Image (cartoon, helix red, strand yellow):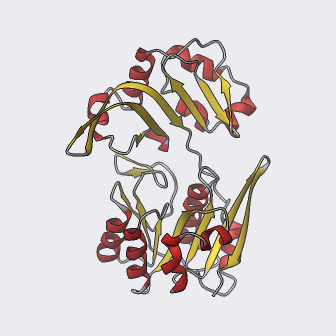
Amino acid sequence: MGAFDEAAAMLPPGLRLGAQALPGLVRRRAEEIRLRGGRPPTVVVGGDELPLPGCGPVTGRDLALTVEIATGASAHTALERVRQGYFTVRGGHRLGLCGTVTAEEGQVKNLRRLSSLNLRVARAVPGCGEQVLSELTQGGSLPNVLLLAPPGQGKTTLLRDLVRLVSNGGSLPPLRVGLADERGEVAALWEGLPQFDVGERTDVLEGCPKAQGLMMLLRGMNPQLLACDEITLPADCAALETCGNCGVKLMATVHAGGVEDLMTKPLYRGLLERRLFSHAVTIDRRRLGSYYQVEALPC
């Protein structure tokens, strides 16, 4: 079963038939299935939204049934866990939710009266990081590296494959990798097992804020490389600096359009000034594939 068909299997029967009726090329390239109450369901392909064939407006029952199927009839328990607006389901796919939030003392406690869902199709691309890793290790060792791209351009996909390659070894000896997978998108643990191949020597800590997760991995798992997805907070930067000063290799993703864009962002100024990361990989996603540029960060 392909990734799209696996994700579409979580839809109610009527919507599932519409998804399965899409042309093969569309299913192979589809990134998301969007369900909005009262509106026709759509599939996101290359930034465009295309209607699912033969489907009428999405109903409240469609939304509720999708969550029930995706969570194995544990929708109530799953909704109570949703504080970031999404959760990971079997196969590594991510289900984003909108609706009416119940909050207590400023904290999200529950989400009810669903208004829309976003089923994001998860795909691994084994081998996409091989040439990148070859360029990064030309000096005989792996440098600390940032993976740069705007949202939705493949940073997580590249990070996943680089972690796999480093963990398994090849041109260089394998390294023990500690993966701080806060959002559950890189390894996508399901009942303790990664849904994606992240390598033989990778230890995954999922659901924990990155800053805490990095420190827990450093103290408890004796990693040689620490990896995390999306540095977004000053605490993340501080944890990376602490870990880097302990001699651990670092790999992380950042929302940036390239090195010049990275240099303008105050959050990362300290990391750059202290030369914690020496290299960057910029991702350029085009219609026919993704292109990677490896470059040294300016001193």
Whether residue 47 sits left or right of residue 4 in the image: it is: right
205 to 93, vertically: above or below: below
138 to 127, vertically: above or below: below
Q: Quadrant of the C terminus?
A: bottom right
Residue 12 lies, in percent from the top left, at 48, 18
Q: Residue at x 40, y 70 (%)?
A: 234
Q: How many marks?
A: 0
Residue 80 lies, in percent from the top left, at 27, 36
Q: Quadrant of residue 133?
A: bottom right
Q: Residue at x 59, y 46 (%)?
A: 123
Residue 93 lies, in percent from the top left, at 49, 41
175 to 70, vertically: above or below: below
Q: Quadrant of the N terminus?
A: top right
Whether residue 140 sits left or right of residue 37 in the image: it is: right
Residue extending furthest toward the left: 105
114 to 47, vertically: above or below: above
Q: Residue at x 44, y 50 (%)?
A: 188
Residue 244 lies, in percent from the top left, at 44, 82
